[in-house]
Image (spheres, coloured by chain):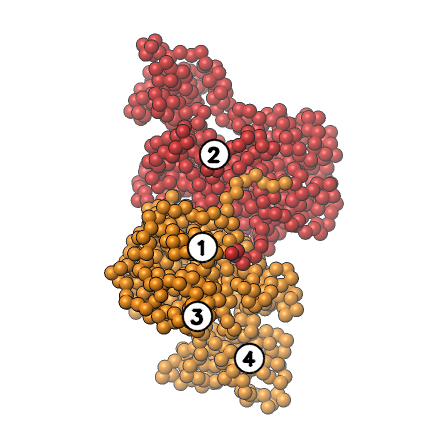
Chain colours: A orange, B red
């Protein structure tokens, strides 16, 4: 027996329709790539997104075709997303911070037919375009006045391009499982793999995300996604903001502390979202200039683990609640968000920080488990490490073109590649990447925890821990340190600093000092390179153990 | 091209799974029908719901079968819902306030095979059971100690019944469009009609409902649905509370002011939901005893229009935010919720009340329009009346067994039978029922507005307005008044009271005084009966007009 409810597919364009109808006058404020602030509304965004869809159609783009965007967060990028999905085509956000080889690889792998490109990236793409044969046209996200001389194939200024149609267009009718968007994961090894979001997953993810224990988005909010749309589906804010009808503030190309601060204050931003690096810059800017935040009440921080000092500063100095979150491109991307569940009672501030260091609890639509190497569940005691596995309505079941093969376990769980603990109240904490965790005598040691501890030393600029082969324990931790400029540290100083703060058997067997630690295109420590560099290293203690 | 996200159907049992896993220790506190408070947890509710499902199976209940509940809000009723849906069967909530004839009609129409029944209603059903041939077994929601002597067919105490199985059960696998629940609408005319909710619509409705601009439910909340589960799908709180993991407080059979107040305070309730009648009783109790509310922060009020004085008292005297809502059984049930959108600027308190008198804005998943009798859209100016039409993912497309025929317009909109205005910011206000609105010289007059005005007079206990045939204007309003006990009012007094507060042409042509106004089973004014009573009435002014 079936229910007798309406057939109302969950489609991305229904989100912008809702915003335009119920919250049509609400502002979308962008720092344009050309410079000045630009103000528009959801009603206008929808109107122009229809022009985008219509104009794409005239360029021969059809449902299912991939359309790339290489762009900052601006109103035009937003319009492009809705225009693309409203035609049934698939937005493919490209991270401009990827290496040119990777950009070429993914654009070709996706067979992108058209690319929306910001002024910033025109030179980059000009150099690359010979290697992008599938792209038939480049639409530069600007107007005629700012259109550069360019060699880009069939290049046209966005404003001129959409002005060629009247916007008399009806969104196409689609299956809610149709592809809506793509984002490639930038793994540290192998070629990037394409995650394909559906209309259904994007809409459901946003419905989940607006909830009080997630983004907590109300029509009275003003949200600024500092996280770029090209980072892990833009954390779905291009959908969750219009779904709520809140004001949307888009920072464009300027993500430095001063520029972010300026927008937070001038636009009355109440909620923001981004990676720790951006907040480091913001906090430094505010401290250097004795500034306060007058409207911001909540910051969603994810992408990498949020340092304790950052949470403390936001909460204590600036009275901003930090929602520490974790997710993956493969999860659309939210996997967990941390809050203080009532189970914890009423902890003091240090207790709150202890909890907020966790990446948090899975919202409805996400299922989590932690398992040992044999696939057996390990207990939720807040201590036992396990491989973090996820299942849910917004979780990838496979990569584009089947790359990477079967990625789900027999129960349908996706292996995140992370190692985590989950406490008795369901709050998860990432302890390491599965490939980085050190397996010492059958027990697991978190390299991240050791790194976080080491960077707490006032003379340490950056720290990385890798496992090095050990004849007795299989692997033991080696701590690699970049000292702060003009600082000199001794190994004993670091070891003494760490003593008493970790279990004895976690203590690194040695500390080495280097000038630089290698990073990936997205700023993560490239541990493969470190492991390669130290592959012939032997511990000073090793002779004794042998 | 399809998305590559996981196939993860939206099923009711995933909600209680989520609650049990992520918020397993959170309390579900009920006032038992037997008397004492009962405390359990989501983990336990899920465990026992699995026993219910398993035990129903042993009684031969299969996927798609309808299982009736005639019960108050308690943990056992909650377990029954999840047990029923987890087996793929369909919960059918029956409103015990319906006339026995109607109860018999709908139980037969639904072909209910089993009924969960509260102690309260055993005598009612004993009298009725001969007319309920499809019901094979009655499960009385109590334990052995409280089980009454009863003639009910195959009667068994719930606790004994579920104790016969071990709970080793796996939820059945279902299409998300499978039927999950049923609720009959109790129209003022004709037989009740069955609305059939799907798993998908229940889950989506709850995801929509937890949002900050709807119920605003967080894991840190304690919600008490005073609205019974049998009223319009229980406003979906049986799903939205576990989805959030908030504490759930269930008031059982005692909905009087003192009992409701006691639970609000003793259980630290932060959010509640119910119809105005309940709040009248609560406010009266608190006023009479000089009481305050120490934890309640938000009250969702719907079911019928919330009087201005009630909103004012909650907000001003008790510091409780009122979320004025509107919905229908056919809408799962939320259609709109009122909040102060930023478009209104910063109104003073009277301005806030003006806005909160509206039933509010459609959340995402609900589309609204207002249309004239010809089906043409009328403007959203906050003044123009139109028939309120809705479309959406949780809106009925037809009634059970096709009763009432085709209920959607060519664009797929459902006619709510209400007449409303929508203001430029999307906030809707019900002005009348379509069959009650008075059409005077081509313009529409709201009987509800006239009634609300009239009951504001200190000597008026109740007021009803009906349209009476008029040779010149087609229809003109007749105001019917029940004076307060021992009060005597004159027509001129009422007219003078209303003057200046409404447009001149809205003024009732006559006022008549009666001892009583007829009501439906659910407490609504039975205007059909009033119209019948006054069908031969002629206005004193009519002779002059003719």
Task: Determine the secondary structure under disc 1.
Answer: loop
Subunit of label 1: A
Determine which residue is flagged by label 4.
A467
Residue B431: in sight, yes or no?
Answer: no
Rendered view: B453 above or below A45: above
Subunit of label 2: B
Nearest the camera: B530 or A47? A47
Where, quadrant-wise, is the C terminus of chain B in this rendering?
top left
Rendered view: B496 above or below B85: above
First in sequence: mark 4 or mark 1?
1
Real-space Cα distance between discs 2 and 1? 31 Å
Real-space Cα distance between discs 4 and 2? 67 Å
First in sequence: mark 1 or mark 3?
1
Co-location on one chain, circles 1 and 3 = yes
Rendered view: B437 above or below A430: above
Nearest the camera: B249 or A42? A42
Total numbered badges shown on the rendered structure: 4
In percent of width and height, residue A434 lies at 56, 71
Examine the image and state in which quarter residue B185 appears: top right
Q: Residues within 10 Å of mark 1 (few under 14, many from 20)?
A: some
Task: Determine the secondary structure under disc 2.
Answer: loop
Co-location on one chain, circles 3 and 4 = yes
Subunit of label 4: A
Q: Residue at x 38, y 39 (%)?
A: B427
Determine which residue is flagged by label 2.
B409
First in sequence: mark 3 or mark 4?
3
Determine which residue is flagged by label 3.
A104
Determine which residue is flagged by label 1.
A62
Real-space Cα distance between discs 3 and 2? 50 Å
**Can you tell which of label 4 and label 2 is closer to the viewer?**
2
For the residues bearing labels 3 and 4, Cβ distance under 8 angstroms: no
């Amino acid at each position: 027996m079936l229910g007798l409810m309406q057939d109302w597919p969950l489609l991305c364009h229904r989100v912008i329709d809702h915003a335009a109808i119920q919250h049509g006058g609400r502002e979308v404020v962008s720092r344009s790539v050309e410079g000045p602030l630009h103000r528009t509304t959801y009603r206008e965004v929808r109107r122009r997104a229809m022009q985008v869809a219509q104009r794409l159609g005239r360029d021969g783009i059809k449902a299912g075709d991939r359309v790339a965007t290489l762009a900052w967060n601006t109103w035009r990028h937003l319009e492009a997303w809705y225009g693309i999905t409203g035609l049934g085509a698939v937005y493919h956000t490209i991270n401009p911070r990827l290496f040119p080889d990777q950009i070429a690889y993914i654009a070709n792998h996706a067979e992108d037919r058209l690319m929306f490109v910001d002024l910033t990236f025109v030179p980059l793409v000009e150099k690359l375009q010979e290697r992008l044969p599938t792209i038939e046209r480049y639409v530069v996200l600007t107007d005629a006045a700012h259109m550069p001389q360019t060699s880009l194939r069939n290049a046209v200024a966005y404003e001129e391009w959409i002005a060629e149609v009247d916007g008399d267009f009806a969104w196409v009718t689609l299956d809610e499982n149709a592809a809506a968007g793509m984002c490639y994961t930038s793994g540290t090894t192998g070629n990037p793999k394409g995650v394909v979001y559906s209309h259904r997953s994007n809409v459901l993810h946003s419905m989940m995300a607006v909830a009080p224990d997630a983004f907590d988005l109300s029509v009275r909010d003003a949200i600024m996604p500092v996280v770029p749309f090209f980072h892990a589906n833009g954390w779905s804010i291009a959908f969750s903001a219009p779904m709520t009808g809140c004001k949307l503030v888009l920072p464009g190309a300027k993500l430095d502390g001063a520029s972010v601060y300026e927008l937070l204050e001038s636009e009355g931003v109440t909620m923001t979202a981004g990676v720790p690096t951006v907040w480091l810059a913001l906090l430094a800017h505010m401290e250097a200039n004795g500034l306060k935040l007058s409207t911001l009440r909540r910051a969603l921080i994810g992408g990498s683990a949020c340092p304790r000092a950052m949470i403390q500063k936001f909460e204590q100095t600036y009275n901003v609640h930090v929602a520490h979150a974790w997710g993956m491109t493969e999860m659309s991307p939210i996997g967990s968000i941390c809050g203080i569940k009532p189970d914890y009672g009423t902890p003091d501030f240090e207790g709150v920080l202890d909890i907020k260091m966790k990446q948090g609890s899975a919202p409805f639509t996400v299922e989590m488990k932690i398992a040992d190497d044999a696939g057996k569940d390990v207990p939720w005691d807040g201590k036992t490490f396990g491989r973090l596995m996820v299942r849910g309505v917004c979780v990838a079941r496979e990569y584009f073109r089947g790359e990477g093969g079967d990625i789900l376990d027999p129960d349908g769980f996706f292996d995140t590649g992370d190692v985590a603990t989950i406490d008795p109240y369901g709050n998860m904490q990432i302890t390491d990447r599965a490939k980085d965790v050190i397996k010492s005598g059958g027990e697991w040691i978190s390299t991240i925890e050791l790194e976080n501890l080491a960077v707490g030393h006032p003379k340490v600029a950056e720290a990385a821990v890798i496992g090095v082969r050990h004849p007795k324990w299989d692997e033991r931790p080696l701590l690699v340190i970049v000292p702060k400029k003009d600082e000199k540290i001794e190994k004993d100083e670091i070891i003494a600093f760490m003593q008493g703060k970790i279990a004895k058997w976690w203590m690194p067997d040695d500390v080495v000092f280097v000038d630089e630690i290698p990073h990936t295109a997205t700023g993560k420590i490239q541990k493969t390179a470190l492991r390669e560099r130290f592959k012939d290293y032997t511990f000073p203690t090793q002779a004794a153990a042998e």
